[in-house]
Image (tube, rainbow, N blue to C red):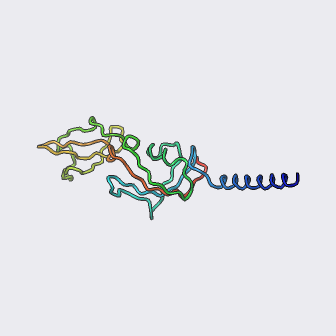
């Protein structure tokens, strides 16, 4: 009986230690405030990074980051690193052919020399600002692409989780 009691106490102590390890080792999940470093690659080219700069902080479920990235971060722990691939549909969406519009060249500011690939800042009727990329120039017209610059692109993120806290 004494062996059983001692064995039971040892088992209980191990379980308590395991529980405290998990309590001190939070995982990314609903409502958590997460701080991470990331490097973003598109077509094997590095586009941006937070490494050596301010890390990214977001609250899970607040729609602060793209859905495909958020879904694949769930379950990660502090100091964990991962390569995450996000398909266009779960990032900035597929290219929308309806988002291409022709404008007269004269509608551009006179200080701008139109070039294919040039990103302009457009203003909506409500005053909000958004990017528009010149996708074609023909005669006296320019075609602007109002898709997000990363629409239609698969993204690869290298991430390292720095901090997980209770959010909000």
Which residue appears at 35% of the width and 56% of the height?
47
Where is 42 relative to 126, above or below? below
Foreground of the two, 9 or 57: 9
Residue furthest to the right: 1
Could you say where residue 74 lies in the image, as x and y percent from the top left? 53, 47
In the shown orientation, is residue 152 left or right of residue 116? right
In the shown orientation, is residue 8 left or right of residue 145? right
Foreground of the two, 145 or 153: 153
Foreground of the two, 128 or 144: 144
In the shown orientation, is residue 97 left or right of residue 11? left
Q: Quadrant of residue 142?
A: top left
Which residue appears at 20% of the width and 40% of the height?
103
In the shown orientation, is residue 47 left or right of residue 57? left
Where is 125 relative to 165, above or below? above
Which residue appears at 80% of the width and 54% of the height?
7
Could you say where residue 8 lies in the image, as x and y percent from the top left? 80, 52
């Amino acid at each position: 009986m004494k062996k059983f009691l001692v064995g039971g106490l040892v088992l209980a102590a191990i379980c308590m230690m395991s529980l405290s390890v998990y309590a001190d080792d939070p995982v990314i999940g609903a409502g958590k405030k997460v701080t991470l470093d990331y490097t973003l690659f598109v077509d094997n080219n590095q586009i941006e990074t937070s490494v050596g700069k301010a890390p990214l902080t977001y609250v899970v479920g607040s729609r602060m980051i793209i859905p495909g990235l958020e879904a694949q971060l769930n379950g990660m722990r502090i100091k964990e690193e991962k390569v995450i691939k996000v398909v266009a549909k779960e990032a900035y969406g597929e290219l929308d052919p309806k988002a291409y519009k022709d404008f007269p060249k004269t509608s551009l500011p006179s200080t701008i020399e139109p070039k294919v690939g040039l990103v302009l800042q457009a203003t909506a009727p409500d005053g909000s600002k958004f990017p528009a990329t010149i996708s074609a120039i023909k005669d006296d017209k320019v075609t602007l692409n109002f898709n997000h610059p990363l629409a239609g692109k698969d993204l690869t993120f290298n991430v390292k989780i720095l901090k997980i806290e209770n959010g909000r």
